[in-house]
Amino acid sequence: MSEHHLVPLKAADGSIVDAVLHERVDAGYGLKVDSNWKAHLAAETVRAVAEGRAISHLEHGHWEWGEKIKESAHLLSCPTLAIEYANETQGLMLVQTDGHFGKLPQQVDKPLVYVVYLATAPWNLRALGAMPRFSGVGLVMLHAAIQMSIDNEFKGRIGLHSLPQAEKFYERQGFQCLGVDLEKEGLKYYELSSQAASEFIGRSTL
């Protein structure tokens, strides 16, 4: 594990807890997350069948974090961040801090931080039917990505390709859609401008 610091998460009872944001985790960590998250998904699926209810398909449910981290762990510009609380991983995010440039008119060809993957733990998703244990994981991760952009003198600029289930979330946070990218499996490409990043930080609350 590398450097870490405390970040706030909102628990199901409305209280705010101090979670830990790790700024880089390794492939072994990712394998443990894969095991824990998939076990939870399997248990929720069994429960849903027993109760005779449908369970939403998670577009990122097949992601293998151990492999994703392994592929980029040797690159300083591709850290994977993790949020932990009570010894459980609440969310993961893999970013790239070089090689990506803006497409919005006001930031064409200016460097930005690219969010490769971002996911919250299955027990924090309303799509599974239960009350999420914690909310705000995605917001904390975006805040971390913006801060990373600022630290790299990119003025908060961020880019990402969004899964369909997450599009509305990013749009609510001020990301602008630049259309479908056929080279990325038809996913829509989004960018956050430096101005929108400042506004995000200014209103960032759980």
Image: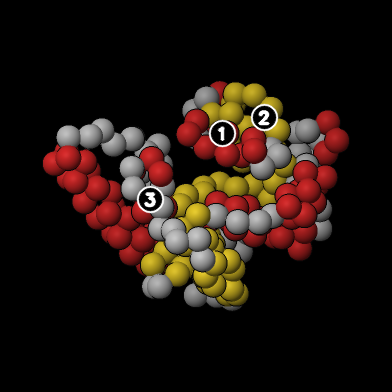
In the picture of the structure, the residue carrying the numbered disc 1 is 167
Mark with earlier residue (3, 2): 3
- Separation of residues labelled 3 and 1 (CA atoms): 21 Å
- Separation of residues labelled 3 and 2 (CA atoms): 30 Å
Does residue 94 appear anywhere in the picture? no
Horizontal relation, residue 87 to residue 181: left or right: left
In the picture of the structure, the residue carrying the numbered disc 2 is 177
- Image quarter for residue 50? top left
Does residue 15 appear anywhere in the picture? yes
> Mark number for residue 54?
none
In the picture of the structure, the residue carrying the numbered disc 3 is 131
Q: Amino acid at mark 3?
A: Met
| Secondary structure under the numbered disc 1 in the rendered image | helix
Query: Looking at the picture, how far across and down is residue 190, in whole percent?
Result: 65, 35
Q: Amino acid at mark 1?
A: Glu
Horizontal relation, residue 143 to residue 25: left or right: right
Taking the spot 41% from the left edge, 52% from the top edge, the residue there is: 132
Q: Nearer the viewer, mark 3 or mark 1?
A: 3
